[in-house]
Amino acid sequence: MNNHDSPNSNWSELNEARNRFISEIAQNMHLYGISQSVGRLYGTVFFAEKPMTLDQMSEALGMSKTSMSTGIRELSKSKMVERVWEKGVRKDLYQAEQDWYKSFSAVFINRWRKATELNKEAIQDTKQMLDELYDTTTDSHLQTHINRDLEKLDQAEAYYQWLDEVISLFESGEIFSIVPKK
């Protein structure tokens, strides 16, 4: 029997394959506003054969239970893990959310809705400032620049209205009739 056929080698190859995916997921979690260490936690829960307790996560990752609690809270908020109940188990159990589309939608909606609202407020504030400046100046050259800026802000405002519609597609689930889940 060669080394690759030994049971221990097969298990280490399985772990190596899992670690490959976990490492890549962890590196890209910043796209979801999640740290690499929490990304590794997600990968660990994702590959777990059954729901895990915070103690089990802590042991698997060699990190404190407090860190696990904070990470799980962050992953729960992003709809990437869910708390589950199991008869006879008194500790909280967590498993990875199987619907990745749900997780992505939750993160996308929360992040983009917040950013869009802040940017729309900034547009309104800036327009008000420019309108007041326009009304108080007699400098025609400055007024020309103000008008150009107001046109640019109108274009930005149109973009954010469009983005609101895109966000609404995710909120309603209509996005999946346009781009079906695989």
Image (spheres, rainbow, N blue to C red):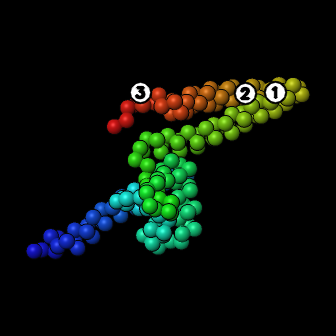
Marks 3 and 1, how far apart in space?
42 Å
Quadrant housing residue 60:
bottom left
**Of residues 83 and 157, which is closer to you in this image?**
83
- For this view, does 2 lie left or right of residue 25? left
Q: Which mark is residue 79?
A: none
Marks 2 and 1, how far apart in space?
9 Å
Q: Which amino acid type is marked by label 3? A: Ser
Q: With respect to residue 155, does 84 lie above or below?
A: below
Q: Badge 2, how many Cα within 10 Å: few under 14, some, many 20+?
A: some
Which residue position holds label 3? 177
What residue lies at 35% left-to-right and 64% top-to-bottom? 19
Q: Position of residue 57 (x, y in %)?
A: 46, 66
Whichever of labels 2 and 3 marks the residue nearer the N terminus, that label is 2
Whichever of labels 3 and 1 marks the residue nearer the N terminus, that label is 1
Q: Nearer the viewer, mark 3 or mark 1?
A: 3
Q: Secondary structure at mark 1?
A: helix
Which residue position holds label 2? 150
Q: With respect to residue 106, does 71 lie above or below?
A: below
Q: Position of residue 89 (x, y in %)?
A: 46, 62
Q: Which amino acid type is marked by label 1? A: Asp
**Of residues 155 and 65, which is closer to you in this image?**
65
Which residue position holds label 1? 131
What residue lies at 43% left-to-right and 57% top-to-bottom? 87
What residue lies at 23% left-to-right and 73% top-to-bottom? 8
| Pointer 3 with pointer 1, Cβ within 8 A | no
Q: Badge 1, how many Cα within 10 Å: few under 14, some, many 20+?
A: some
Q: Secondary structure at mark 2?
A: helix
Q: Position of residue 43 (x, y in %)?
A: 41, 59
